[in-house]
Amino acid sequence: MIHRKSAFFGAIAALVLPLAISAQEAPKTNLVQQPAAQQSSGLKIIVVQGEGALNSTRARTATQPVVEVRDDSDKPVAGAEVVFQLPAAGPGGVFNGWMRTQTTRSGADGKASASGFTPNDEEGRFNIKVTATAGTKSASAIVGQSNGRGTNGSGAKVSGGRNKIWLAVAIIGVGAIAGGVGATRGDDKAAATAASIPVSITPGAVTVGGPR
């Protein structure tokens, strides 16, 4: 009886021992979790007009920002919601007299533009934030502009205005100096002419008497 039990346990040990050895020798599996790939937003915004524009604080004229919304395939996206947002303080302006934000839709060509943008009287650089949304996809962009007094109605910088004023002042000054020199020469000439006229003194009788 004892012999049979020993044989039974021996057979079990013969089966279990190789399994235990193979489990110890098996390579450990790398369980480090890899980071998930970043998903694309699916949209992008191309600035068509307004980047680097100079707006006139004196004439209250500005370059209206225009953007184009495209997908990952670089095709225009129609019907996307586009929001233009101006700074809450500092250099900037308003839309249609009082609004800081304006919402519009992109057309069939993917383009969207703001309207009624008027600069305020603060000079300096500022950014217009643009956000586009189409379904679950979105994108954002920045349109950088500046406010200044030395610009014209189209947003282009005016050059030479102050220089023209100084040029006119210089011309007037030169004319005044030339006139003064001419007048001085005229006086000298008149004095010389007067000096060249002979003066004759004719002696006459001198009478001395009492009061009459």
Image (tube, rainbow, N blue to C red):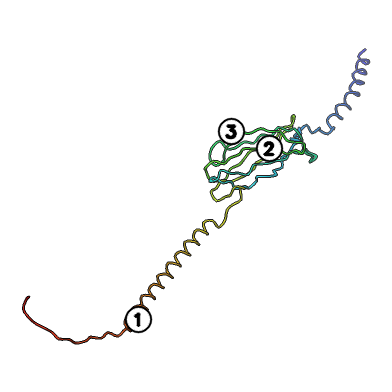
Q: Earlier in the sequence, mark 1 or mark 2?
A: 2
What is the crowding at mark 2: few (fewer than 14 residues within 10 Å), some, or many (at least 20)? some
As helix, strand or loop, the secondary structure at mark 3 comes to loop
Depth check, front residue: 9 or 85? 85
The answer to whether the residue labelled 1 contacts the one labelled 2, judged by CB atoms less than 8 Å apart, is no
Label 1 amino acid? Thr
Badge nearest the viewer, 3 or 2 = 3
201 versus 45 height, above or below: below
Residue that numbered label 3 is attached to: 99
Q: Residues within 10 Å of mark 3 (few under 14, many from 20)?
A: few
Rendered position, 172 above or below 20 = below
| Residue type at the position of mark 2 | Ser
Q: Name the residue under label 1.
A: 193
Q: Please, is residue 84 above or below residue 182 in the view?
A: above
Tell me where residue 178 sits by quadrant. Answer: bottom left
- Residue at point 62% right, 37% down? 116
Q: Residue at image x 85%, y 32%?
A: 26
| Left or right of residue 162: residue 198 | left
Q: Which of marks 1 and 2 is in front?
A: 1
User: What separation in Å lies between label 3 and label 2 (alpha carbons)?
Assistant: 20 Å
- Occupied quadrant, residue 129: top right
Which percent across, then down, holds residue 21?
86, 29
Tell whether 155 sits left or right of 205: right
| Element on which disc 2 rests | strand
Furthest-left residue in this view: 210
Q: Which residue lies furthest to the top in this view?
A: 1
Residue marked by disc 2: 140
Asked whether 137 or 5 is in front, the reply is 137
**Mark 3 vs 2, N-terminal side:** 3
